[in-house]
Image (cartoon, rainbow, N blue to C red):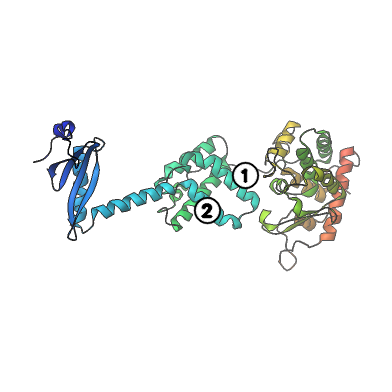
Amino acid sequence: MALADTFVRQVKHSGKPAGDKYADGGGMYLLVKASGRYWRLDYTYTGKRKTLALGVYPAVTLAQARKRRDTARELLADGIDPGVAKREEKRAKLAAAANTFDAVAEQWLKATAAKRAAITQDKVSTWLRKDVSPHIGKMPIASIVPRDVLALVRKMEARGAIDSAKRVAQICGQVFRFAVAERTAERDVTADLRGAFQHAEKKHYAAITDPAQLGALLRAIEAYKGHVCCMAALKLSPLVFLRPGELRTGEWAEIDLDAAEWRIPASKMKMRADHIVPLSRQAVEILRNLQPITGHGRFVFPSMRTGERPMSENTVNAALRGMGYSSEVHTAHGFRATARTILDEVLGERVDLIEHQLAHAVKDANGRAYNRTAHLPARREMMQRWSDHLDKLRRGADVVPIGRAA
């Protein structure tokens, strides 16, 4: 006789140590013990008698227990042991819970680190930690759907980080494809989001290219009072033509002050090629003054909080803002454009030497890329002339307006 809801709700344990069984039909019964009421299903598979747990009352109602019984019997009809199927399902759920987006992203970061420059690895890690993890980081990666990724991208777009939002979506896609290869996800859900992102207008980094205005900026830098590392980075930025990330992640092991050279490994460079920066006398002086302060550690410009990380990517730009130079007037990256323009249009330096020193792709007459030592003596002389010219501009002397160069 089938059980009734009222009976299941009111039945009490009789005191028998093994409990009391009340059949509902189809092999299912209610086992009543002192510790609670349990749904069970007795069945036979390959001649062996087995018991399957269907849940605990009242968390699993009579109706729900019957549905689980019927599902188990359907499996038996298909030749599948419902007990084994339940264990496999539990294992799959545990695996999914362990394979969160954060966990898979960490595996992906480690597996692909060699393909990225150190500065890029740091930026990607920061994006994942700050913009992705709070939204989908703790979710099993197999359970994430396109709208979950779109929601975090929309939040980034809302604060104006249009380009970064698109890049983060691409990174998420790479993590999903890695998960597919590792069999922890079925597919890359970001494929459904193509065309859903905003597009930002292409912007160039603001840069001062007028010699007189540059002289004023150099005087402001000379007068700036802040953290010693920030002051040194500000003074060195116009002298070395490096991208801000390449500058701030500089290590003392890369610098030979006696040889007046900074040799940056390919892993840190945007173009993935080793790069040599000849250091002018002025650049060497800045670094020698800084060496007693940070030379005991790894980074030339360590973080103000810990020496284990380099200076923040916003430090130099923040200093420029504090000096009154907005992001529409001049940026840390803009020092490269400043050098490129004035060296060419005012000082008349060879364009190929300038481009090579900017670590741009420069090819010889046969179309082959120059190696890192190409024209090093000529570049060394150019870098010294540039530093000397900046000294003159800072003093307010020998200013030659662009367009009137001899």
Could you tell whether 78 is left or right of 235 in the image? left
Q: Position of residue 30 (x, y in %)?
A: 17, 41
Q: Residue at the location (21% across, 50% down)?
A: 51
Q: Residue at the location (56% across, 43% down)?
A: 127
Residue 350 visible in the picture: yes
Q: Position of residue 128 (x, y in %)?
A: 54, 44
Mark 2 is surrounded, within 10 Å at the Cα level, by few (under 14), some (14 to 19) or many (20 or more) other residues, namely: some
**Callout 2 secondary element:** helix
Mark sitting on residue 108: 2
- Please name which of the two marks, 1 or 2, marks the residue nearer to the observer: 2
Q: Position of residue 42 (x, y in %)?
A: 18, 50
Q: Position of residue 95 (x, y in %)?
A: 40, 50
List the single residue furthest toward the right: 397
Mark sitting on residue 202: 1
Q: Residue at the location (80% across, 33% down)?
A: 224
Mark sitting on residue 30: none
**Callout 1 secondary element:** loop
Does label 1 or label 2 sit earlier along the sequence?
2
Viewer-side residue, 193 vs 171: 171
Viewer-side residue, 227 vs 22: 22
